[in-house]
Image (tube, helix red, strand yellow):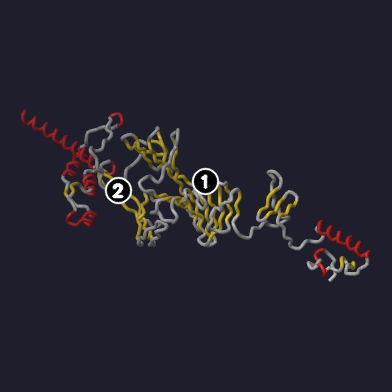
Amino acid sequence: MAKNSIRDYDATSGNNTDVQSVDISEGCAASGINNALREIMTDLKNVSTGAVALETPAADQLNVDNIRIDGNTISSTDTNGDITLDPDGTGDTIIASGNVMIGTTTEGFADYADTLTVADTDHAGITIRSGASSSGSLYFSDATSGSGEYDGYLNYNQSTQKLTVGTAAATRMTIDSSGILMVGKTATNYQSVGVEAKGNGSLWATADGNGPLICVRKSSDGTIVQLYKDTAKISEFKVTDGDNLSIDCTSTNHSGLTFGTDVIVPRRGGAQSDNTIDLGAGGARFDDVFATNGTIQTSDQNEKQQIASLTTAEITAAKAISKLFKTFKWNDKVAAKGDAARTHAGVIAQEVQAAMTDAGLDASNYAFWCSDTWWEASTEVAAVEADEEAGIEAQDAYTRIDTYQTADEAPDGATERTRLGVRYAELLAFIGAATEQRLGDIETRLTALENA
């Protein structure tokens, strides 16, 4: 075969009989030797310029410009020289297998292949590792950590599609496949201690032995928490007067409270309110009120007018009402307790109204007689299946009764309800005033008879 380049040269000298077709075999012409040398020099130049590539050469050490390749080491022959790997165009720098260490000669995890460790000789740094189950991890170590030990980490598991973040070698935060962020826990459950932030806007905070929510406003009075329904703000929790907690319902005419020093004060429209707020309603009553003392009712003469003694008709009505007191039991208490339901004493509001009418009076003109009307609508609530993960307990289907204080608020088909009542303090004062006037009249008449 013709030896047309250095790659065609034969390792057996007897097989090299020409150079670029110049005969150099035994007995060749002397002039062929000169021409052959010239062709060899051309072949060597072609190798030097790269026009002809060498076959895989072997060398104990290779120096190329300022780069030295010696055994398994690539180094720079310049003092503090840099080594740059720069693939042309869209090419990649590929390390097919094994571990890569930068700044250290110790693998971050000796038991695992395919890791990249960037650290100093004291192991302080980071290790990137691909693991089983298509997972990838980033580990953080400090100088006190040994090889394969770490203080913090970031791990993504492709199989479970879960991202975990750890500190002090323990998981601190997890984002699961549905996007739920968990802090201090690795599985969603409203009973597990930790915090969950969900993509649907729910935020769960579960604590054991300490408060799960602390809201701090520094320096000035004002809002701490705001509550919205859609785009409308419906309530605020705020600090007022330095250290009082106030709750305001911001809808028109809605009530609120201030919790002050030894006092609970009603609010309306974002400020304390006097003589505007009721406690309970005709269709939503409290049961018992436990108190050391009775209620204090304003009786200041400066706030009253048209002060008068009872008329004859009023005395007549009061006398009739005083005979209407009876004992009775409440229907709902009998339904709940049967014969154990206790006996109460009082009047029947309808009978009080009749006594006033018989005396020619309108009971609705007197504050001791009350008539409250509201509207009720039934809503069927479907059964709910338990979902422990979402913090939902099972519940049977039921009918909910919603109440409305005005006809305008009530939906179509709502039922109008009316309940009668009395203010016993005022009713007894009414009866007492009539009794006193009757007794005074009797005493006057007795005195007149005695003096006759």
Nearer to us in this view, 103 or 433: 103
Residue ID for mark 2: 285
Does residue 262 appear anywhere in the picture? yes
| Front position among marks 2 and 1 | 1
Nearer to us in this view, 191 or 296: 191
Binning the other alpha carbons within 10 Å of mark 2 as few (below 14), some (14 to 19) or many (20 upward) gives few
Does residue 200 appear anywhere in the picture? no
Which structural element holds mark 2? Answer: loop
In the visual, does 147 lie left or right of 62? left
Residue 298: name its quadrant.
Answer: top left
In the visual, does 135 lie left or right of 322? right
Label 2 vs label 1: CA separation? 65 Å
Which structural element holds mark 1? Answer: loop
Instruction: Identify the mark nearer the N-term, 2 or 1.
Output: 1
In the visual, does 342 lie left or right of 17? left
Residue ID for mark 1: 142
Residue for point 17% across, 43% down: 322
Residue for point 21% across, 36% down: 310
Residue for point 75% across, 50% down: 65
Residue 23: name its quadrant.
Answer: bottom right
The disc label shown at residue 370, or none = none
Q: Residue furthest front?
A: 27
Type of the residue with mark 1: Asp
Q: x and y percent of residue 180 in the render? A: 48, 54
Q: Is residue 62 above or below residue 210?
A: below
Quadrant into which the C terminus falls: top left
